[in-house]
Amino acid sequence: MIKRIFTPVSIFLILLLSLGSAAAKQTAPSFIRDAEIEHTLRAYARPLFKVAGLNGEDVEIYIINSTDLNAFVAGGQRLFMFRGLLERVETPGQLKGVIAHETGHIAGGHLARTQDALANANVKSIVGMILGLAAMAAGGGQAGAAVVLGSQDAATKSFLQYSRTQESSADQAAITYLNRTGQSGRGMMEFLEIIGAGQYQPQTTISSYYRSHPVSSERVSALSQRVLASPYKDKPPSDEDVIALKRMQAKLYGFTRPLGSTLKKYPVSDNSVEARYARAIGYFRYPDLPKAIKEIDSLITEYPTDPYFHELKAQALYENGDILGALPPLETAMTLAPSEPLILTFYGTVLNATGNVRDSETAIIVLNDSLSYDPNNGNTWDQLAIAYSRTGDTGMLSLASAERSLLEGNSQKAIFHAKRAQDFFPIGSPSYLRLEDIITISSQASRN
């Protein structure tokens, strides 16, 4: 586990798997959650989802903390993107091309049999299966087998085996989506060149994206014809999209590399927004709080209405022990981005950390607001349980604990907390009925 990366606030890690084999554990990285990065990916994807006939709110986007260059769709409308891919793309067009292509797989109903088999699988299981298969393909047979066995779903052994027909179909759909949104498809061609360049490398070093998304000369030719025939082929990306990509990559770099590496890539002589952003993150993780705050304050001075710079200042202070000092910048971030659930959850977390009962009462309001935007965030339910515990509301404490256990896939704990909570609510009340649902869902899961 990488130390202090994306801590349990608006930027945090959730460990995916707990397997007996130490080797298997090495193949199980974590999810990355970050308000700004998720906002950027949604902004890139939303127009593409819309023209593909998909409800963008129904498509879940996950970021896997792995250096592998990969992306895939699984378990219904779930899009998984690897950190390695987000760091490797060179332009917004390349990243949008990948998103458009994967959207083509979703809209086209590709891999229908395995998708049906995985429709109700939880995210941890899906990622465990895929990473296990990737490990075996890369030569880590024993570790990979352990992860696949841990996933308990043999149906996925053929999961990421897209056919050339499906790949070409997804390409053509992607170009259609890009044309309908007035964007160039050159990024797709460029990305194929990136992954195609590795096809002659040793099998163990070829990206899993290339292995799972076969590239043929016919596919490249067909794609090129559509791209070059598009009236938008030479349309450049917007400045806003370019800046968003640079910031995302700088943020990922700062949180996943040692300070020395960050300073080498983003030297102090570089005064760009992304360089100061990366250095600020690297400094506060080191930790060198004064240097971090200096970099962040320079960004806030130039961009006072950017919620993510205020959020980062709060995180730097909070993680270095200044709980009360983190509250003002967080309140500013929340005011500037009132519908960002991860920022709201971070605010609730810091309020709980003060140890003041009144702050926990406020945290309950804020955390419930966060859940109205993202009801499946286990960390939010966990903080809500803490807040209810501080205020002495045993019934809601048990309900929040049941919700958290349900999300974790711990059926026995979910049933235990739900049954305990039922004693505190009138029969037939909304909370009582929700607890009945949790008991039913958990009981069915435990029998499967």
Image: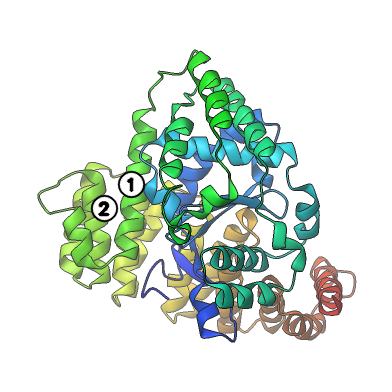
Give percent across and percent down for residue 89.
39, 43
Residue 265 in the image, given as x and y percentages of width and height = 20, 54
Residue shown at the point (51%, 52%) measured from the top left: 70
**Residue 201 in sight from this viewpoint:** yes
The picture places residue 347, in percent across and down from the top left corner, at: 45, 64
The answer to which image quadrant residue 16 occupies is bottom right
Residue drawn where x is 42% and y is 55% of the image: 84
Colouring: rainbow
As helix, strand or loop, the secondary structure at mark 1 comes to: helix
- Residue 429 position in % (x across, y down): 85, 68
- Disc 2 to disc 1, how far (Cα)? 7 Å
Q: Dividing the image into 4 quarters, which one contains the N terminus? A: bottom left
Tell me: residue 192, above or below residue 438: above
Q: Relative to 45, is 197 on the left or the right?
A: left
- Bin the neighbour count of mark 1 within 10 Å (Cα to Cα): few under 14, some 14-19, many 20 and up: many
Residue 168 got which mark? none
User: Residue at the location (18% across, 66% down)?
Assistant: 260
Q: Which residue is mark 2?
A: 277
Q: Which residue is mark 1?
A: 247
In the picture provided, is 77 more to the left or to the right than 193? Answer: right
Quarter of the image containing the C terminus? Answer: bottom right
Which of the marked residues, 2 or 1, is nearer the chain's N terminus?
A: 1
Residue 307 in sight: no
